[in-house]
Each structure stands twice: as structure tokens, then as C-alpha cells.
Image (tube, rainbow, N blue to C red):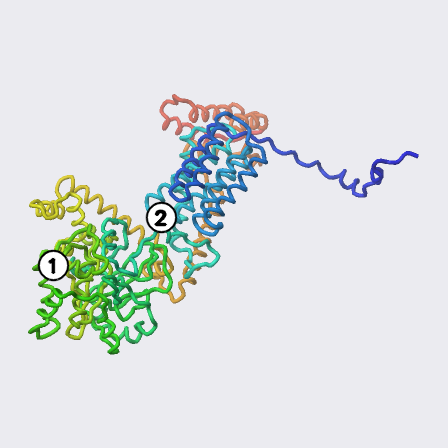
Amino acid sequence: MATLKNPLKFIKNPLAPLLNKLPPMPSQPPTHQAHRSTLLQLSLLIGIAVVLHFSIANALIASFAFAIFILKTIIVFKNYSPPPKLILMILTIASLGMVIYVYGGWNGQRAGISFLILLVALKFLESESLRDYYIVCLLLYFLAASSFLFDSSIVNILLVVAYTIATTGILLQISNPTKVPLKSTLGMSTSMVAKALPLAILLFFFFPRIQGSFGFLPSSDAGSTATSLSDSLVAGELASSAFNNELAFRVEFVDGVTPKQEQLYWRVKTMPLEERFQWRVSKPEPQNFVSKSTNSEDLKLDKGEWEYSILHEQSTDRYLPYLDYLQTKDRGIRLRDFSVYVTRRALDTFSYNGSSSANSFAEFSKPSERQALLQLSSRPNAKMQLLLNTWREGASSDAEIVNRVYEYFKSQPFEYTLTPRALDDLDPFNDFMFESQSGYCEHYASAFTIIMRSLNIPSRVVVGYQGGSRVNDGQFIEVRYSDAHAWSEVWVDGQWRRVDPTATISPERINLGMEALLELWDSGLIGSNDTGLALENLLNPTGASKWFKQISDSWKSASYQWNKWIVNYDFNSQRQLLKKLGMDHHNSVTTLVGIMSLGGITLLLFYFWQLVPKTIERDPLQRTYLKFVHKFKRHKIYKKPSETPLEFSQRLASLFPPSEDDIEQITNQYYQLRYSIESGDSQSDIKQFKSLIARFKPKKS
């Protein structure tokens, strides 16, 4: 007996009658292939992104992405087929493994952007259909937006806008089955982006900004390139920052009231602990925090003599720079030593406000504090001990002793240098005072503070910045890491007094700033006979130098305003903007939601308004012809929208035979006036045409 190969073959499908009644499945519409020139343009865009990635990612990952890009470019040029699926799978696994190996995972900005660039390159490599290329373009939009995680400058946003326009132009070319000129697509994409920009700007400024951060966002890698001042001061190390021109922060003073250059001491860290000519900060303890009540009692000068706002660049430092001496602030915890400590570092740019005065106002609360500021590990030798006895002998006060030591530094052949030599490891203090007599600011601050403690005067070293470059006649001040400075602080006459021995060794460093000093240093004019002339040319440039400085200041000013209002635009900035617009409210989120709702309703109304049929504006000739058409309404005869005047006249002639000649004459004259190149005196002809229609009356047989 024969067996059936498929027993279910003859079982009747109960749904068969229903399926037979259904309409056939629609066939897939025919699609076109992307043009070769369009793919080459897309390849160029991806190539630019891959090359720029070398400045962000690990060289291994960037090189791997570049190799994939070159392979796809060859495929496009030679019109080859994409690699087999197995090869693509191996490359994908290798990409993922490479990111995990280099970054220890994919959590983080650099790991995420590296994975995205590899994803773009691999997707482009396997792309063959239009849908694939659409996805590649979509990924390019994400890639362009992710660049703001690393650079939010004016130049970068212009590049991102140009990149977006180019990507949109490629999308338009891919969507069009016929080849479209590049100039035409770029014009259309530019128009589309330009129309979207106003809405994007409104959303940027008025979309509710949420305070705080999100734990699920990738961790920031900005700290890997951020700079900060060290918590310890080793002789010679601070001098290396003199050639670091990286921007630390920018300061804008309220009402333009700016201190003199020699008053611009920006305190960051106070270092009371000394060991062998080296200094370090003490660990912030809760008992050293200045409470709110104490802080409010310290407001002796009505918020200080100077009020200012600081726009700080990214940094890993837990101490914030404020102008000495701090009175009030809105960020960080103020310690008893005038430094300001933050419990959480802000790796991105951030802003804060403060006010300061020229005088200090703190006092010792315990005798132990005074004793701690007299501790020393460096010991004076016999020669130094003789000097100490001389300074102490006959002095009526600690202030007089301080002045004597200061004058000693001024009278001796000490030199200020940006490249100090190494000191003796066993006795660096005495080696500097009597052998080297050459150093940077930390050498002089350290030596002066040790001398003060040896004379039983409480003292400490302060590290921060001094000076800064004034931009646009003091509109704001740029402080760079090259402005890093160290000075001494001594306790005399019941208050802290700043003493900077560098000011007597190198007055131009304090009075003119580090920028001027570096200019002289680079030109080799420090200490030469041409120093005065070089300073005059630097401070009062003429000709091309003056023009270049004006351009430089204008660009710095634009960059500052950009960072202040765009890059650093946060919840507090948004509240200030609303306040300036007269929309200050205790609940700014409610205000912003109302603004966004009103904006959304306005957009909807504008959209529906565009859908409303608009009255067509007609010229006098058309309006006259319509009067002719309306004469047939009482006969219930209407001109169809699809009918031409000639077709309409032929239909009328069949319905009104006695008026056939008049209808033909009116129609011919209308054609003559409307479409003829030479229609004679148009005004007189139109007047005659109006008269002809006015006399016309339809007649039936």
C-alpha cells in the first residue's frame, strides 16, 4: 500500500473561501538606485567625520573606522557589491570588542561616539538599497549632534549646520529618481534648515530646563583633558604652567568697576602645611566651613567693593577661584582660610557670582590655629639665623618685621625666571636664599613664608592666579593657566595681609601681567635695553598690530558671549531671561510650559490657516470675463473648473444659437487681450471689451 508523503496535503483549509475573496496583496512599488555621484558625496561626508574622529577617539579605533571608509569608497568607485554578511558580522564584532577593550566598556562620551562612528562606517559598508542609505543619513544627524559633547564653540556649530545642510541635500538626492544638480539640492536643503532654525532657537531658550543631572546619562570624559592647580606646591612645578596658554576662566565685573591690575589676586588654594620647602593644602574639615550665619555677619562692605561673575572652563579642581578677599558667593563652601570648596566637581563649563573687598576680616578662633601656622620642617642655617636676629632686633611690631624682610628681597640680587634650576634636595631653602637666588613665584612665596614662621609670625602660602588679560578695554578679563601664581599671607595687626615678594623681584609680572612678560620672554628682551620700547609697543600697538588686536578682542568677546548665553545656558540662566522678559514667576516651569503650549497652539493655528482656501486675486481682465460667465447663472449654466474659455463658448453656442456670434466675438477678444503679445492699446481694448460684455444678453432660440 502506497503511503502519502504529506498526510496534511488533502486536508481542506477552512479559511480558503475567505482568503479567496480577499483582494490580492499589493505589489512592492518599483524603486530606483542611488546615483553614483550621490554615493560619492555621502562617502565624502562620512570621510570627514572619520578624519575628525582622530582628534577625539583612540588612534586604533579611528584607524579601524578609516579603513572601513576606504574599503566602501573603493566599492563605490568600482561599482562592486557589498562584502558578504559573514565579513560584515566579523567586522561588527571586532568593532564592539575594540571599543570595550580600549575604553573598558561603552559607558562614556568617547566610547559612545567611537561606537557611533564605527556603526556609521559599517552601515555604509553594507548599504545597497535606498533604505540603507536613509539610515546612514539618519546616523549622520546623530553624529553631528554628538560633536557638541566635545566642542560647543561658534566655529563648531557653524560646521555642524553646514554638515546638516550637506546631509539633508544628500537625502533629497537619494529620494529623487532623477539626477538633481548639486547646487539645486543644496539650495533646497539650506532653505529647509533655515526654516527650522527659528523654531530650534525658540525651543532652546524656552523649553523647560530641568535642574540637576541624570544618572543614566553616559559619564563625561571631559576631565581627561581638563586642567587644574595641584593640591601641593613643589618648587619649580608651578613655573611649567607659565607656558600653558589654556583658558582657565573669564570674569565680568558688575557696572564695569574693575580692580587695578595689581589687585587682581584670584585665590584658589590656601596651603598651610610645609615640608622641606614644599607646601600642600589641608583636608577640608566641617569645623573649617563658614556657616551661613557667620557668612552673613561678614558682609561688612555691603557685598564688597567689587561684584563679578565668573565663567569657568571645564576643570577637575574642587576649589573655585574668587577674587581676594571674598565676601559673598553663590557656589561652593567657603572655608575659614578664604578658599571655596565644592563637594562635587563640575567637569563642563559653569558660571557663578561673587563679591570681594581689598581687606580681610577673619580671626583665629583657637590658639591651636595660630600654632599650626608656625610649624616648620625647613631650618635656617647659621647665616640665615643671623639675618633673622637682625630683622627681629629693635622691631616694634610684626608689621615692621614684615617690611624689613620685604626690603631685603628688594635689595638683594634675586632674579625672576621662568626656567628655575633644581634646588639642593637636602637643604632647598638655604640653597635658594644664598646660592641660587633665582626662581619663579613659588620660590619667593615659599621662602618668605618660611622666614615669617621662623620669626614667629603666622603665615601661609596661597596659590591661585594673578592678573589676566583685559579684553575690549576691560569689558571682561581672561585668566589663563599661565597666570597661575603663588604668594604669601601673614597675620599682622589682627588681620591677614597679602605679601607678594615676586612684586619686588619682577614688578612687570604683577603690574603688566603674565601675557606681557611672556611676550618679552619669547622675544628675548627681558632685562635688555629694548625692554621699555617693547613694552610700549605691546601695550599701545599701532598699525597692523593694533588692527590684529582689535580683531582678536572682537573674536574673544563674541566667544565669551556665546559661552555665557549659549554653552552655559542652564536653569538659572533661563530664569534670568524670563525675568528680563517680564515673566518672572515663583514656578518657572509652569511659566515655560505655558509658553510652549501657547507656541504649540500658535503653530497649529498657523498650519490650519494655510489649509484654508484663499481668495484668488484676479486682474481687471479676468474680473470682466467673469461678469460674462455670471450672465448665464440665471439659466443655471456654470463654467466648469476644467473648461477652457473656448470649450465653454462652444457649449454656450449650442445652447444659445442666436447669440453664437456675440459669444464667439467675446471669447476671441478675451484670448486676444490675454494671450496675444501685441494687443494694441490694452486700456482702450479692455474698455471696449467691458462695453461689449455690458451690452451682451444671452438669447435662446
Question: Residue 427: x percent and y percent?
Answer: 20, 61
Nearest the eye: 98 or 701: 98
Question: Residue 658: x percent and y percent?
Answer: 55, 25
The answer, for residue 262, to whether it is visible in the render is: yes
Instruction: State the separation of the CA atoms marked 2 and 1.
Output: 42 Å
Front tag of 2 and 1: 1
Q: Indicate which disc residue 682 carries.
A: none
291 in relation to 166, above or below: below
Which quadrant would the C terminus be assigned to in this image? top right
Question: Residue 597: x percent and y percent?
Answer: 45, 56
Q: Identify the residue under disc 1.
A: 504
Question: Residue 348: x percent and y percent?
Answer: 36, 55
The answer, for residue 640, to whether it is visible in the render is: no
Q: In what element is the residue under mark 2?
A: loop
Question: Most extreme residue toward the right, as rendered?
Answer: 1
- Which residue is found at the position 22% from the left and 67% from the top? 460
Nearest the eye: 674 or 275: 275
Q: Indicate which disc residue 152 carries.
A: 2
Q: Amino acid at mark 1?
A: Thr
> Going by the image, does 439 lie left or right of 614?
left
